[in-house]
Image (cartoon, rainbow, N blue to C red):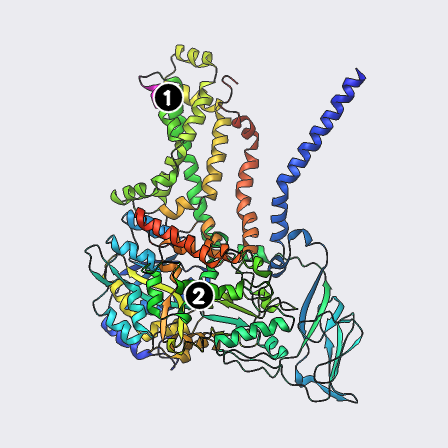
Amino acid sequence: MDNIAGKRGRLTWALNIAVFLLVLLWTIPTLGLLVSSFRDADQLQASGWWTSLSPSVQSSAARTGPPATQTSGLDGYVLEGNVFGDASGEVVTFGTTPMMPDAFPAGETAPRNGGGTLVVNADGSYRMTSPTPFEAPDLVTGETAGEPLPDRGLRVFITSTEAPDFTTGNYGTVLNADGMAQSFLNTLTVAIPATIIPILVAAYAAYALAWMSFPGRALLVSAVVGLLVVPLQMSLIPLLQLHNAIGLGRGYIGVWLAHTGFGLPLAIYLLRNYMVGLPKEVIESARVDGATEFEIFRKIILPLSLPALAAFGIFQFLWTWNDLLVAKVFLGNSDTQMVMTGRIVELLGSRGNNWELLTAAAFVSMIVPLIVFFSMQKYFVRGLLAGSVKGG
Amino acid sequence: MPPDQDSRFNWASYHEFADRHDLTGQSVSISGTWTAEDAVTFRRVFEYFEEATGATVNYSGSDSFEQQIIIDTSSGSPPDIGIFPQPGLLRGLAGQGQVTPLPDDTNDWLRANYAAGDSWVDLVNFEGPDGQTRAYGFPYKIDVKSLVFYSPENFAAMGYDVPATMEDLKALTQQIVEDGGTPWCIGLGSGSATGWPATDWVEDLMLRLNPPEVYDQWVSHEIPFDDPHVLAAIEEFGWFAKTDAYVDGGAGGAGWIDHRDSPTGLFSIPPRCFMMHQASFIGSFFPAGTEFGRDVDFFYMPPYASHPELGNPVLGAGTTFAILRDTPVAEAFLAFLRTPIAHEIWMAQTGFLTPFSQANLDTYGDPTLRGMGEILVNADTFRFDASDLMPGAIGAGAFWTGMIDYVAGQSAERAASGIERSWSSLARTGGIEEGAE
């Protein structure tokens, strides 16, 4: 017995560890996204999020103060200051040419091309000397008719370690983007009716298909199942043509109708299978007691079907909330009509490079679906099983 | 800025336009690819149109314009005006009769007022549904592609000069390697469009090795893709891109480094590269605070000293305006684009180049744009990005992947004949669909 119990214990452990590892694997991308959303755009481009907690070693060019700040001393003309300015860091090595930022360890005196010396200390303070007065840096000019700026300092090349840099600026940019509030309202205006209308229609339809007997019922059910496999992309153009032809054009009514149409097959299928599983006796005794079909539907079926309704509601809400395609086609693209997903795509910049904003925007747009999910979560698990086991 | 305030702008053209058009209360809808900052600057342009005519402009920008416009036209609800990122798509719609031809004097106007005018005329004249060739589009807002970016301070530190000929550029490339540096950043990565920066290289070299007529024959498939003229241009690109020491990341690295990341190589310490061939738009990918003319500068991709007869060809891309629904306001808007003021307002902002010779170069917002604008106005030949003109399956497919294969080690003959095979099989099956990027 002990042996068996021991084995079972090990097995349970193995199972727990496996589940834990899977969950870890599953959440790592989200964690990376979260960390990235707080990182500075330049650091994000330079290194991965997993390096974000350790100080980074990087080579860079710092500038001395402008040539006008030079003093003349015993060893010629001198520029002094700190390569970090007001920030802090630690210089490891430095150099006098862009090709060699690690030619000399911090604190050593390095000769400069064309005479003079340069010292950079570990704390960033530097001293640059020259036998001739300092001038603005040399430039090889191309097509831009740029003049060297007289107040521009010379470059000092350093390799330094810098503390990790986190910012909430990405979230600020996303939340304060022009028209974000309007888009948020637009998305709500699309998503809420587009969730409620199909539930209303599908509940009636599901009841009829589950509990009212009429010729061709089985055929109708299989037609609904068949509609589940029709890709909605196929019907975008014909539907829009229809909307234009009947004078509906583009607008909220069009989007609601489209979302309702695309959501109905799944809704009817899910609800019908759930309702079929409700105890037959309850409905039959209600009939015997003289209840009309509508009363049965309203007083018995609807309250009993709440888990399935909630489950489908979550599905449909998430889908309409995250939708970009249907909104773009049936609502339009202008500033006042744009939904939140559209606005976020626009935030990415004309060429999709501002992806530090994408990470922050992902979390911002997740908030409402999360609220919906957690407030309806207790129905969700029950609802997921809806229709899977008859009578369950 | 109210009219008449800044004397650099051609306000006479504004008033003349305003006097001829009164469209109070009417409106025009415009769709295009410009979003974010581009949409804001375009808004400033059409605000002057609104001010002059009293009409309202409804602009909607979408990054999926190419798909959207197909849905809109085929469902019968197109915008009044479409702004097409490449002419191939417009040609397809014009052939289906979805586009209203522009006035008959458009071609003469382009010839007279745009630098390298004939090139522009060829670009926007398509065959309509009746088989007649007419001008269907109006080019406005151009990108110049024949540019090489570099760091003027690094050049000064290493004692390099801006090369005036392609021979000098090759010598400079070798010089940089001798000095221990890496000459080029060639990032070809671009998500699902990986490979397109290589097509710009090949096209630029094509124009510097061959007369523009050969380029046109190549684009229209009158000569095969593996024609010796084309092979020469591909191999010339290979001279730069297929030598490990010449490219940041080695020849293999070019294939996967993203073109949006590769500019950082110019600014890193030590520099990962000294030069980068890219289009004018790349400025928006430079690190924040980068100053043009000081931190970075560019030169015109030089022509070969051995081909003086080809002059200074310029490769570019740009957007084309077309009328999808004929209304008086839409026509007026296209007429507005012919006024110098419509170009100058955007020139004074950012990200806009024009070959329009009557627009005042002094209105360019910064010396960089002006430098690029001068390249455009001084062009002897202007040719549109070939990959945008070829059928989509080639220009936005086989050409890209072929160049990746080539950089990864395939011979020019094999890569080119592979592209040629796809193109001729496309022609045989009649499956030619017009470009899409």
Q: Does residue A296 appear to the left or right of B99 in the view shown?
A: right
Please state the horizontal and vertical placement of residue B407, each as a whole percent of the image.
52, 58
Check the residue under mark 1 and report the chain it is in.
A
Whether residue A155 appears in this view of the structure is: yes
Please tell me the numbered disc located at residue B233. Answer: 2
Check the residue under mark 2 and report the chain it is in.
B
**Residue drawn at point x = 54 percent, y = 62 percent:** B242
Q: Residues within 10 Å of mark 1 (few under 14, many from 20)?
A: some
**Residue drawn at point x = 32 percent, y = 74 percent:** B114
Does A218 lie within the magenta span? yes
Please state the horizontal and vertical placement of residue A285, each as a whole percent of the image.
43, 11
Of badges 2 and 1, nearer the viewer stands: 2
**Mainly helix, strand or loop, the magenta region?**
helix
Vertical comparison of B133 with A220: above or below: below
CB under 8 Å between discs 2 and 1: no
Amino acid marked by disc 2: Ala
Quarter of the figure with residue B336: bottom left
- Mark 2 vs mark 1, CA separation in Å: 70 Å
The residue stretch that appears in magenta:
A214-221
The N terminus of chain B, quarter of image: bottom left
Q: Nearer the viewer, residue B102 or B257?
A: B257
Vertical comparison of B27 with A217: above or below: below
Vertical comparison of A46 with A126: above or below: above
Amino acid marked by disc 1: Ala
Q: Nearer the viewer, residue A391 or B244?
A: B244
Q: Residues within 10 Å of mark 2 (few under 14, many from 20)?
A: many
Q: Which residue is mark 1?
A: A208
Q: Secondary structure at mark 2?
A: helix
Q: Secondary structure at mark 1?
A: helix
Label 2 in the same subunit as label 1: no
Quarter of the figure with residue A247: top left
Please tell me the numbered disc located at residue B186. Answer: none
